[in-house]
Image (cartoon, rainbow, N blue to C red):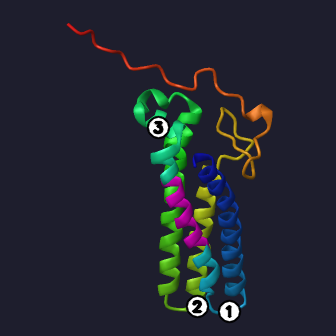
Amino acid sequence: MGTGLLHLHNALRWVIVISGLIAVVKAILNASANKPYSKGPGAVFVASLHIELLIGLVLYFGVSGLAATFRADPGASMKVAALRFYGMEHLILMTAAVVVATIGSARARRAGDEATKNKTARTFFLIALALLALGIPWPFRGDGVGRGLFPGMKAPAATTATPPEMTPPPPPVAPLG
């Protein structure tokens, strides 16, 4: 189940990136041509982000060994790049992207005139895409963070080397006595 969810999570990344780019381009084109705001592209972007967040939370709290290791000892895990990325950075950046895109979509729909709607959508969706770009485990990222571009595809060998200490040291145990 975990592998299937991870593959789905990976594949949905492309739906999000492409729909986000389409939403931004549509908002820019509509603004420059004085056309009304198109809700469709932004709605697909935000809806797919919400689905991706739900899948990610299932992975984080139910399946991911990296996240479980991070949650077991966050202090020591902060010293291991892959544990820090998947345990904290990825979660925070992606959740922030979902929040920004959702707020942008709502504000764009409620803005007064069409130009403001398009500019609001463009701005918020661009910020969300920037957060997504920072939080995606691209294959070129090192320290065991990089993942393949598509489900089942591995990152290049140079970026998938596991750090010498993937798990943090165990916390000291007080003697019984």
- Left or right, 119 with reference to 171: right
Q: Amino acid at mark 3?
A: Ala
**Circle 3 Cα neighbour tier, 10 Å, few/some/many (<14 / 14–19 / ≥20):** some
At which x and y percent is residue 136? Answer: 64, 51
Which residue is denoted by mark 1 in the rendering? Answer: 34
Q: Are marks 2 and 1 in contact (CB under 8 Å)?
A: yes
Task: Report the predominant secondary structure element of the magenta stretch.
Answer: helix
Is 144 above or below relative to 19?
above
The alpha-carbon separation of the residues under discs 3 and 1 comes to 50 Å
Callout 3 touching callout 1 (CB < 8 Å) = no
Up-down: is 4 above or below 28?
Answer: above
> In the image shown, does 72 or 95 lie closer to the viewer?
72
Query: Percent from the top left, x then y, of residue 125?
Result: 60, 70
Please give left or right for residue 150 compared with residue 85 in the image.
Answer: right
What whole-number distance in Å separates the C-alpha atoms at marks 3 and 2? 46 Å
Name the quadrant of the C terminus.
top left
Start-end of magenta stretch: 45-57
- Identify the residue under disc 3: 68
Q: Nearer the viewer, residue 44 or 5?
A: 5
Q: Looking at the picture, does residue 1 appear above or below residue 66? A: below
**Which residue does the numbered mark 2 point to in the structure image?**
114
Please name the residue shown 36% across and 15% down the image: 172
